[in-house]
């Protein structure tokens, strides 16, 4: 018997033992902090036992079992890799070299997809989507969006998010050990809804010289991202969630988002809830970022805050991120830039991509390998001898990668 437990569209796998026998309910995305609330399911007098320790979701169509988990081949996890544009291919080379040196049990299915390098086609996009759906986990660089795109011509980035329903973008903002900034010892998380809002590709020129751009906010998706944020805070032991908005001006759209967050907050009495206007949030982050823990917000605000917060801890080159749906997880840098001006110069900082790759390994329950990679990266930065130019050093991308490799077993 298969049961679907509705939360924010996520299924859970639990083995339930009762008088009538046992049945399975399939779990997904355990590692992103789904607040299960199992005792509220009306299953009194039964014993609950997790069936699957992997954070990957399993579907009935795969006939997945614990002995034969999805996206594995010969005890190796298959992961889709999309290097993207700019320095993406260079950063992915660093990931592959570190994984190879660390004997990480991951096999990459690599696809080169771009809208600015004559690599664009519906066939290639569909191949990437098929691979991501089969493997359920991907690591991706930034796919640059051509400036000439208009109206409903959605970019590949947006289409990937919509096709996979990657509604939640999570960015980890943590101070790096040994690298001093104005605000040290920072530890906050930015959660952004990224399937609606201002980035809906719904704009048109109603009359000559007048452009209308639609911002879409729905109760369903607002509640879903709010629940995701509170579930994340619960799982990760966080104490506060702050909703970021502009409801004082956009009273209907952002008002609905704010109302949805407040309604969901009532279901989590142990998590402190606050809200803050987006412009004030920017100022407060610069002045006193320690007051924040988990921030949740609509699409455009998240794009802005991601980049602002990255600047607090060293820049876009050091902040990891990931995007989640109920079925899939895509790992990428937190502040997403192609850095076209750095292409081929061997100066890009691999830190953010390597930390994202480490988070991907943790998502796959490869805890040992995850810690090995992340600790090696942090050890190199803390030592201060090998740093890229963005962190005040003189090392090349290759030199930094080699230093990480030499620290894998340190």
Image (cartoon, rainbow, N blue to C red):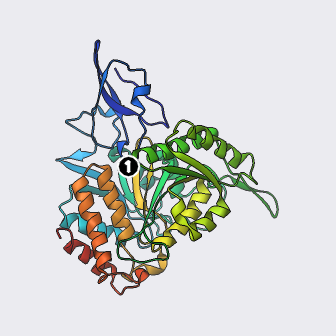
User: Compared with residue 234, is residue 1 higher up or lower down, i.e. above or below?
Assistant: above
Residue at screen point 38% across, 20% down: 43
Classify the position of the N terminus by image quarter. Answer: top left
Is residue 298 toward the left or the right of residue 126 in the image? right
In terms of secondary structure, where does tag 1 sit? helix
* Whole-percent x, y for residue 66 in the image: 23, 35
Residue furthest out toward the bottom? 394
* Whole-percent x, y for residue 170 in the image: 47, 55
Residue 96 visible in the displayed image? no
* Whole-percent x, y for residue 18 in the image: 29, 17
Residue furthest out toward the top? 20
Residue at screen point 31% across, 60% down: 358
User: Compared with residue 97, is residue 345 higher up or lower down, i.e. above or below?
Assistant: below
Classify the position of the C terminus by image quarter. Answer: bottom left
Residue 32 visible in the displayed image? yes
Q: Quadrant of residue 351?
A: bottom left
* Whole-percent x, y for residue 176 in the image: 38, 71
Q: Quadrant of residue 301?
A: bottom right
**Front-most of residues 34 and 179:** 179
User: Compared with residue 196, is residue 46 higher up or lower down, i.e. above or below?
Assistant: above
Structural crowding at the residue carrying mark 1, measured as other residues with C-alpha within 10 Å and reported as few (<14), some (14–19) or many (≥20): many
**Front-most of residues 122 and 163:** 163
**Front-most of residues 140 and 125:** 140
Q: Quadrant of residue 283?
A: bottom right
**Residue underneath mark 1:** 132
User: Compared with residue 132, is residue 224 higher up or lower down, i.e. above or below?
Assistant: above
């Amino acid at each position: 018997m298969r049961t679907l437990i509705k939360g924010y569209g996520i299924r859970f796998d639990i083995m339930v033992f009762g008088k009538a026998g046992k049945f399975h309910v399939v779990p997904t995305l355990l590692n992103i902090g789904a607040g299960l609330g199992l005792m509220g399911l009306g299953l009194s007098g039964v014993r609950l036992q997790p069936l699957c320790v992997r954070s990957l979701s399993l579907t009935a169509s795969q006939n997945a079992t614990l002995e034969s988990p999805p996206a594995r081949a010969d005890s190796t996890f298959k992961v889709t890799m999309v290097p993207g544009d700019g320095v993406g291919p260079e950063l992915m080379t660093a990931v592959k070299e570190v994984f190879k040196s660390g004997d990480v049990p991951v096999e990459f299915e690599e696809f080169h997809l771009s809208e600015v390098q004559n690599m664009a086609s519906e066939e290639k996009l569909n191949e990437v989507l098929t691979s991501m759906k089969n493997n359920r986990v991907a690591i991706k660089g930034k796919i640059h969006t051509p400036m000439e795109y208009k109206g409903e011509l959605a970019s590949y980035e947006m289409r990937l998010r919509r096709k996979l329903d990657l509604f939640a973008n999570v960015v980890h903002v943590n101070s790096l050990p040994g690298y001093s900034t104005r605000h040290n010892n920072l530890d906050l998380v930015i959660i952004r809804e990224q399937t609606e809002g201002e980035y809906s590709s719904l704009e048109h020129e109603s009359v000559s010289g007048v452009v209308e751009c639609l911002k879409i906010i729905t109760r369903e998706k607002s509640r879903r991202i709010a629940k995701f944020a509170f579930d994340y805070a619960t799982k990760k032991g966080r104490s506060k969630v702050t909703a970021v908005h502009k409801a004082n001006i956009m009273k209907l759209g952002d008002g609905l988002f704010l109302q949805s967050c407040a309604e969901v907050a009532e279901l989590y009495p142990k998590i402190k809830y606050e809200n803050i206007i987006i412009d004030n949030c920017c100022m407060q982050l610069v002045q006193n970022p320690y007051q924040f823990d988990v921030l949740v917000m609509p699409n455009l605000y998240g794009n802005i805050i991601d980049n602002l917060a990255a600047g607090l801890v060293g820049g876009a080159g050091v902040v990891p991120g990931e995007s989640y749906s109920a079925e899939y997880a895509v790992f990428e840098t937190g502040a997403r830039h192609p850095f076209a001006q750095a292409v081929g110069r061997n100066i890009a900082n691999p830190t953010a991509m390597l930390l994202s790759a480490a988070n991907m390994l943790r998502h796959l329950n490869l805890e040992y390998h995850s810690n090995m990679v992340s600790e090696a990266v942090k050890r190199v930065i803390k030592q201060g001898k090998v740093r890229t130019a963005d962190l005040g050093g003189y090392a090349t991308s290759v030199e930094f990668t080699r230093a990480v490799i030499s620290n894998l077993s340190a």
